[in-house]
Image (cartoon, grey):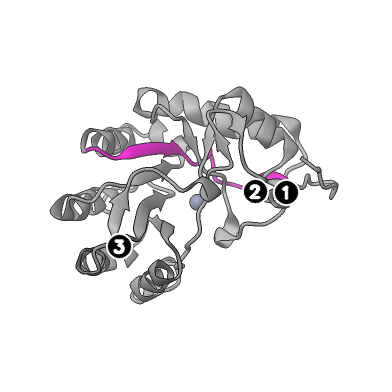
Amino acid sequence: MRRLSLTFDNGPVVGVTDRVLDMLDAHGAPATFFVIASRLRDPQLMALAAQTRTRGHRIGNHTLTHSAMFGDIDDPAFAAQEIHEAQRLIGDLSDEDLLFRPTGKGGHLGPRLLSQDAVSALAAGQHTLVLWNSVPRDWEQQDSWPDAALASLEDSEWTVLVLHDTTSAIDELPRFLREVERLGIELRTDFPDDCVPMRRGRLEGDITSLVQDANGEEHPR
Ligand SMILES: [Zn+2]
């Protein structure tokens, strides 16, 4: 049976995340929400994240500010701040596996996604690094992203789908979930090994292609 792990990045956003939660409830669908942690300084958004957790979903760390890819910033303090301060703000809402997803501009899995400093900070924080294998570009294809997402379900045994609880693109989520149901695809809250190169701080996959520091030097580990 084909599998699907639903993930929502860049929230929470009032008027969007709450609607996503209702849509997921209507289908009994579990998901993981990778939050931009600086948003949680707003009590209303912190409450929305708390509600997300209470309603049975996983909360992951999607950096403090989502301002840059790690490989573009040549400041050793940047990665630690973006990872550890974010985790501090997420606090008790965090999933026990300390899920972390880096900022990937446009969803591209390339050499600037991580830096050696980021990998070290993730290891020190005992994080679980969650990547992805399907980005239907919901921010551009606001009406048609479900078609791209459904196509990727055809291509892969286990899809880790990146959506965003930030725009009206989520209006199409019920249509997508109905189709997922009709196709008998199993919804999962965990992730396939090839999307999780680090588990609880232990490097288990090959991240060579994702690590290149801002000075352009590639690291062979
Ligand atoms: Zn993001």
Task: Kindly check if marks 1 and 2 are in contact, taking CB atoms under 8 A apart as contact.
Answer: yes
Q: Residue furthest left?
A: 26
Residue 142, position as x, y percentages in the image: 37, 71
Cα–Cα span, label 3 and label 1? 30 Å
- Quadrant including the C terminus: top right
Residue 75, position as x, y percentages in the image: 75, 35
What residue is drawn where x is 20% and y is 69%? 182
Assign a secondary structure to mark 2: loop
Residue 44, position as x, y percentages in the image: 29, 36
**First in sequence: mark 3 vs mark 2:** 2
- Whether disc 3's CB lies below 8 Å from ligand 1 is answered no
What span is in magenta?
A: 56-71
Mark carried by residue 69: 2
What residue did someone put label 1 on? 72
What residue is drawn where x is 62% and y is 28%? 123
What residue is drawn where x is 39% and y is 34%? 40
Assign a secondary structure to mark 3: helix
Assign a secondary structure to mark 1: helix
Mark 3 burial class by Cα count in 10 Å: few <14, some 14-19, many 20+: many
Q: Residue type at mark 1? A: Asp
| In the image, residue 76 above or below residue 3 | above
| In the image, residue 158 above or below residue 89 | below
Q: Residue type at mark 3? A: Ile
Cα–Cα span, label 3 and label 2? 25 Å
Instruction: Give residue 115's quadrant in the image.
Output: top right
- Quadrant including the N terminus: bottom left
Seen in the image, is 219 located left or right of residue 137? right
What residue did someone put label 3 on? 170
Q: Residue type at mark 2? A: Met
Q: Within the magenta stretch, is there residue 63?
A: yes
Seen in the image, is 65 located left or right of residue 45? right
